[in-house]
Image (cartoon, grey):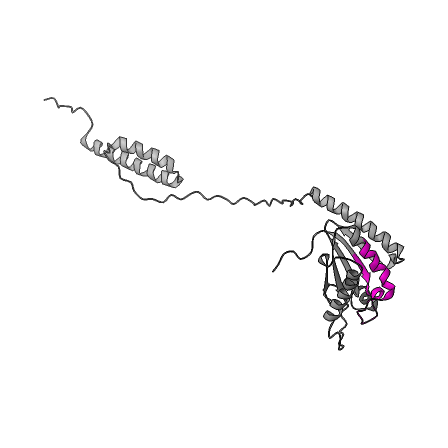
Amino acid sequence: MARKIKKGLPPWMGTFADMCTLLLTFFVLLLTFANMDVKKFQDMLGSVKNAFGVQFQEIGKFQPVLPEVKPQPTRTLMVQPSMPEPSVQDARDASDAAAMADQVQNLVNAAGLGNAVEIKSGPRGVRMRVKGQLLFEPGQAEVRASAHKLLESVSKVMEKFNYYLTVEGHTDNQPIATSRYPSNWELSGSRASSVLRYLVQLGVPTRRVAAVGYSSNYPIASNSDEEGRNKNRRVEFVFTKKPLRVGGA
């Protein structure tokens, strides 16, 4: 009797094929997670859903890990700060101050005191530095008669130019202790006031002048030797277009 031949695959082949498909899907998922590419994972997930006939989706929670990025060497950008350009008013003020400085220098030279006076000018005004021994006796604050000609030149400058004047008194760091001047503060302030008082007597308006004593706080030379101390004992005349102190309290 002839044997019947069964057509088609054996039943176990279907189960085996399903298992291979599931394993393939599992390894594809592992490979996708290893690459840490979220976009590719989403694309692959859509394909798996279509293949297995998933009818709904539920949002899960996962934390992707970004691939490590090697730090790049930092570069420092050096920016050179731009200096503000001088304004037209600053240039005009500097020009006026230079003209005034020339006038002061001419008057000082005419008084025969050019070597004893130092004059500087800038946009803020003019500074005239006078050695203290030219104006006062050591340890005293009365203006010498020989200095009257210089102060008369200063009054002429104040009459010609509409500037404000601050008279600064400066000393060296050697202590002084007398009944009249207990310290260098009193001495420097008294010297500045004496000069200002004489200028007012010459007609300089009181509203345009001021006096201040700085003691030994602003030296221009070393106080370690007599030459430096002689330079530090001085009176400075500061001419400015605006008063150094503006307004009330």
- Locate residue 109, reporting x and y percent: 88, 54
Which residues, given as a range, are shown in magenta?
Answer: 128-156
Q: Quadrant of residue 21?
A: top left
Residue at the far top in the pictured view = 2
Is residue 131 inside the magenta stretch?
A: yes
For this view, does 44 lie left or right of residue 75? left
Counting from the top left corner in percent of width and height, residue 37 is at: 39, 38
Residue found at x 31% / y 33%: 46
Q: Is residue 249 above or below residue 174?
A: above
Foreground of the two, 59 or 88:
88
* Relative height, residue 173 to residue 110 (above, below): below
x and y percent of residue 71 in the render?
52, 45
Position of residue 234 relative to residue 59, above or below, is below
Q: Residue 12: within the magenta? A: no
Q: Is residue 182 left or right of residue 43?
A: right
Q: Relative to the observer, which residue lies in front, 184 or 189?
A: 189
> Which of the pair 3/240 is nearer the observer?
240
Depicted 59 relative to depicted 232: above or below: above
Badge count: 0
Q: Quadrant of residue 169?
A: bottom right
